[in-house]
Image (tube, rainbow, N blue to C red):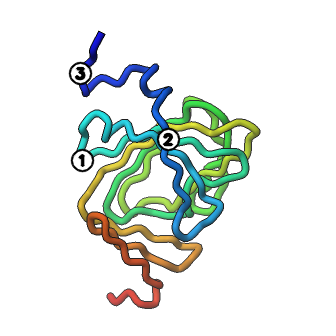
Amino acid sequence: MAYPRELLKAAVIACMEGQSKTHLVNANAVRSAKNLGAATGLRNLGVHVMTVLPGHESTEYHRHLYEEQCFYILSGSGTAIIEEKSYPLEPGDFLGFAPQGAAHTFVNTGTEPLVFLAARQMLEQDACDYPRRGKRLYMTGDQEALVDFSQIKG
């Protein structure tokens, strides 16, 4: 049976190849992402199934200035670092981060892959602070500019 683009069956998702990405300021932040949103034609909402292997982080510790993000843990275990405090993660946990909200990252501290659903707005422009690095990333479409906090005026 043929299905419309808007419906991704579980078997199709399972066969999708994840795109591996290493974060630009953190070589230990390595994840694989299956882009469900793009596969169904979404343009303003990014939805991914993310996989982080044991010992790796999901991203550099950060906060978005304009976009909202949320995460739902599907399998595996790990640790959420939120405002420099550690919290255990397990299947069924949900995390939501408002613009200019708490800085965060996830670390797979378990022995199995940490798998979660990630959703975020896909704004044309956003900025992301990396407090541990003292840097801000400005994003406009496919263009990015990484600057030191000391270079930001205002």
The quarter of the rendered structure image containing the C terminus is bottom left
State the SS at label 1.
Answer: loop
Task: Please state which of residues 61 and 27 is positioned toward the viewer in this rendering.
Answer: 27
The amino acid type found where label 3 is placed reads Pro
Q: Residues within 10 Å of mark 1 (few under 14, many from 20)?
A: few
120 to 10, vertically: above or below:
below
- Residue placed farthest to the top in the image? 1
- How many residues crowd around disc 2 within 10 Å: few (fewer than 14), some, or many (20 or more)? some
- Residue 95 location in percent, x, y? 49, 43
Q: Which residue is mark 3?
A: 4
Q: Which residue is mark 2?
A: 18
Residue pointed to by mark 1: 44
Amino acid type, residue under disc 2 in the picture: Gly
Q: Are marks 2 and 1 in contact (CB under 8 Å)?
A: no
Mark 2 and mark 3: Cα distance apart in space: 21 Å
Does residue 116 appear to the left or right of 66 in the view shown? Answer: right
Which quadrant would residue 114 be assigned to in this image? Answer: top right
Q: Amino acid at mark 1?
A: Asn
Q: Secondary structure at mark 2?
A: loop
Residue under the point 67% across and 43% down: 78
Earlier-in-chain disc, 1 versus 3: 3
Which mark is first along the chain, 1 or 2? Answer: 2
Residue at (45% x, 39% y) in the render: 34
Q: Position of residue 4 (x, y in %)?
A: 23, 21
Position of residue 19 in the picture relative to residue 98 (left or right): right
